[in-house]
Image (cartoon, rainbow, N blue to C red):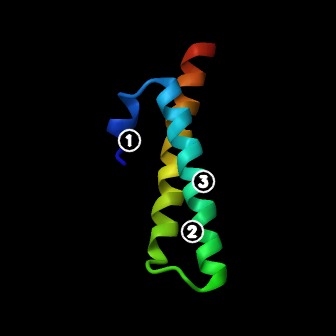
Amino acid sequence: MKAKQLREQSMEELEKALSDLEEQLFKLRFQKSTGQIENPIKIREVRKDIARVLTVLNERNAQESA
């Protein structure tokens, strides 16, 4: 997910993406703890995607309050 793509999405889409990513991260962490994870780098990618979504959401909230 690129930040440019995220900025084109609506607030509802961003919030849905955030919840999906958090769920995906939970599943990946669970797989890691049980030793079933195939690609451990995926955890890092999902964490970065979550950070991107949160950044865009915070930017929008700052614009609305200003």
Q: Residue furthest bottom?
A: 35
Q: Nearer the viewer, residue 25 or 51?
A: 25
Q: Amino acid at mark 1?
A: Ala
Dot 2 corresponds to which residue? 28
Q: Nearer the viewer, residue 44 or 22?
A: 22
Dots 3 and 2: beta carbons under 8 Å?
A: no
- State the image coordinates of residue 53 (x, y, percent, origin top left): 50, 41
Callout 1: few (<14), some (14-19), or many (20+) C-alpha neighbours within 10 Å?
few
Q: What's the distance in space between the residues labelled 3 and 2, CA to CA?
A: 9 Å
Q: Amino acid at mark 3?
A: Glu
Dot 1 corresponds to which residue? 3
Q: Quadrant location of residue 36?
A: bottom right
- State the image coordinates of residue 31 (x, y, percent, origin top left): 59, 75
- Residue at 54% of width from left, 47% of height from top? 20
66 on left or right of 14: right
Above or below: residue 31 compared with residue 26: below
Q: What's the distance in space between the residues labelled 2 and 1, CA to CA?
A: 23 Å
- State the image coordinates of residue 9 (x, y, percent, origin top left): 40, 28
- State the image coordinates of residue 18 (x, y, percent, origin top left): 55, 42
- Residue at 45% of width from left, 63% of height from top? 45
Per the rendering, the mark at residue 23 is: 3
Above or below: residue 26 compared with residue 58: below
User: If you read the primary sequence from the N terminus, does the residue marked by circle 3 or circle 2 appear first?
Assistant: 3
Q: Amino acid at mark 2?
A: Leu
Q: What's the distance in space between the residues labelled 3 and 1, CA to CA?
A: 20 Å
Q: Quadrant location of residue 41?
A: bottom left
User: If you read the primary sequence from the N terminus, does the residue marked by circle 3 or circle 1 appear first?
Assistant: 1
